[in-house]
Image (tube, rainbow, N blue to C red):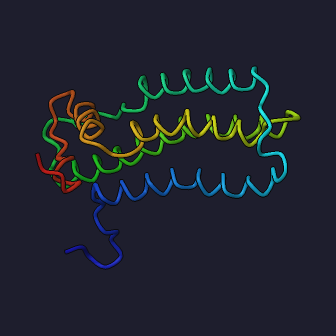
Amino acid sequence: MTAPGTPAPASLQTFRTLAWSLMGALVVLGAALVFVYDGRLGEEPELWTGAVVVIAAVVLLTLIGAVGYRTAAIVAGTPEEQARTTSLRAFQTALILRFALCEPIVLIALVLGFVTDQGGFLLYVVGVAVAAPGMYVHVLPSERAVARIQESLEREGGLSYLRQALGADA
């Protein structure tokens, strides 16, 4: 039981709910864009705008692999409660970082859709179609993501207790 005023411990399900909420915002924004682009929904975007979105996706998704799972290491001998708290913060920070690196793919598509004369809605759909699989793989907490973060936390010999803190005992 936690003391009054202490936040409830996060669980893997809490982080999954957060990730689905972040990803769901793309659908809500798309629904709003239907009204913005009313009458111009079937227009095709210019080829160069789609290429920019795809290139941005490649760059950002590569960057996620390079920095999205890095954390500060837990020092050997760190007390369990402190290690759990540090691990949960690192897990949350890394999750938000990975989302922040996926989201610009959609934002670039959105901006290009307003800057160019045609195909804005379809360009947004392309942006979401390119970003959504990356979000599913990198943002939605999975066994692979937990393992990668735990490995990063424990790389110098300390115990992270991340799985236990998430309620995902292995």
Quadrant housing the N terminus: bottom left
The residue located at (46%, 36%) in the rendering is 133
Q: In this rendered view, identify the residue nearer to me: 135 or 70.
A: 135
Residue at the far bottom: name it.
4
Image quadrant of residue 75? top left
Q: Is residue 12 above or below residue 2?
A: above
Percent x, y for residue 82? 23, 52
Quadrant housing the C terminus: top left
Q: In this rendered view, identify the residue nearer to me: 17 or 35.
A: 35
Residue at the far right: name it.
117
Percent x, y for residue 105? 61, 34
Q: In this rendered view, identify the residue nearer to me: 162 or 53.
A: 53
Q: Is residue 152 left or right of residue 34?
A: left
Q: Is residue 147 above or below residue 32?
A: above
Q: Is residue 119 above or below residue 10?
A: above
The residue located at (77%, 41%) in the rendering is 42
Percent x, y for residue 148? 27, 32
Q: How many marks?
A: 0
Q: Is residue 166 left or right of residue 51?
A: left
Q: In this rendered view, identify the residue nearer to me: 97 or 36.
A: 36
Percent x, y for residue 99? 50, 42
Image quadrant of residue 109? top right
The residue located at (17%, 44%) in the rendering is 78
The residue located at (36%, 32%) in the rendering is 69
